[in-house]
Amino acid sequence: MARRKLAVLLADDHAIVRAGVRQLLSTEYDAAVTEAGTAQDALNAARQAKFDLVLLDISMPGRSGIDIVRELRAAQRDTAILILSMHGEQQFAVRALRAGADGYLTKSSVSPELIKAVEQVLSGRRYVSEELAQQLATAVASGERESGTEALSPREFEVLRLIADGKSGKEIAAELSLSFKTISTYRTRLLEKLGMHSNAELARYAAREGVVQEADDAV
């Protein structure tokens, strides 16, 4: 029986991860995989060819995966977008879905669940783990309000992530194609919303909340 043909855009900055995902996809599909090592490379590819599926990492050189989801959606309106990340669901999954992604899968569970997640998003449904789905249902039922990183705008969240990565204001401005003054304004909002006073506090908070894997003290 002929296997389903699938055009896939796979964006991850680790070649070994791309190789592993490509191998998993090849067990189930006749997959034509285009690889990208940065968010910008992924955007360029999405503007040049049509894909059935985009598998997108969050942490890549330059802009993050979540930061480009809306632009990917504009370029590929009917394409399924599945975030595939080392970051835990708690802080990133809802944000990714709000940005326009169709699902979120952690790399720790990729082997047993990848095909299940791919099938689900290709069928037009959303994919999150059963655990996160239960947490979201509980939060809705209890009327919990957004707090912490959930209360941040997408751009504020991105600036927080880059501060936690040890980037300076000028480096963040260059990476996000914004002015230094604008980045300073976002930093001020972050400090106010989170009740903090320095980049070092923001970095430690981001590490504690899982926004980054490990945060260096920022200055």
Image (cartoon, helix red, strand yellow):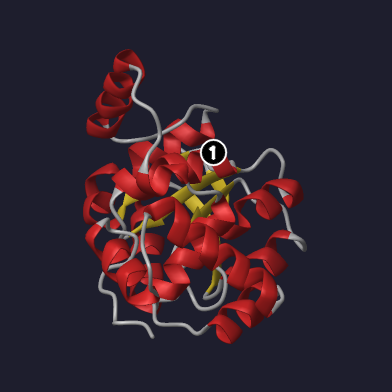
Residue sitting nearer the eye, 104 or 62 = 62
Q: Measuring 37% from the left and 70% from the top, which residue is drawn there?
A: 19
Q: Measuring 61% from the left and 66% from the top, which residue is drawn there?
A: 185
Percent position (x, y) of residue 218?
36, 82
Percent position (x, y) of residue 205?
29, 62
* Category of crowding for the residue at label 1, using alpha-carbon neighbours closer than 10 angstroms: few (below 14), some (14–19), many (at least 20): few
Say what secondary structure mark 1 lies in: helix
Would residue 90 appear left or right of 62 to someone viewing this image? left
Would residue 127 appear left or right of 189 to someone viewing this image? left
Q: Is 136 drawn above or below residue 163 in the view shown?
A: above
Would residue 208 appear left or right of 40 to someone viewing this image? left
The amino acid at mark 1 is Arg
Q: Which residue is mark 1?
A: 98
Residue sitting nearer the eye, 166 or 191 = 191
Q: Measuring 49% from the left and 48% from the top, which residue is drawn there?
A: 152
Residue sitting nearer the eye, 125 or 197 = 197
Q: Residue furthest top?
A: 141
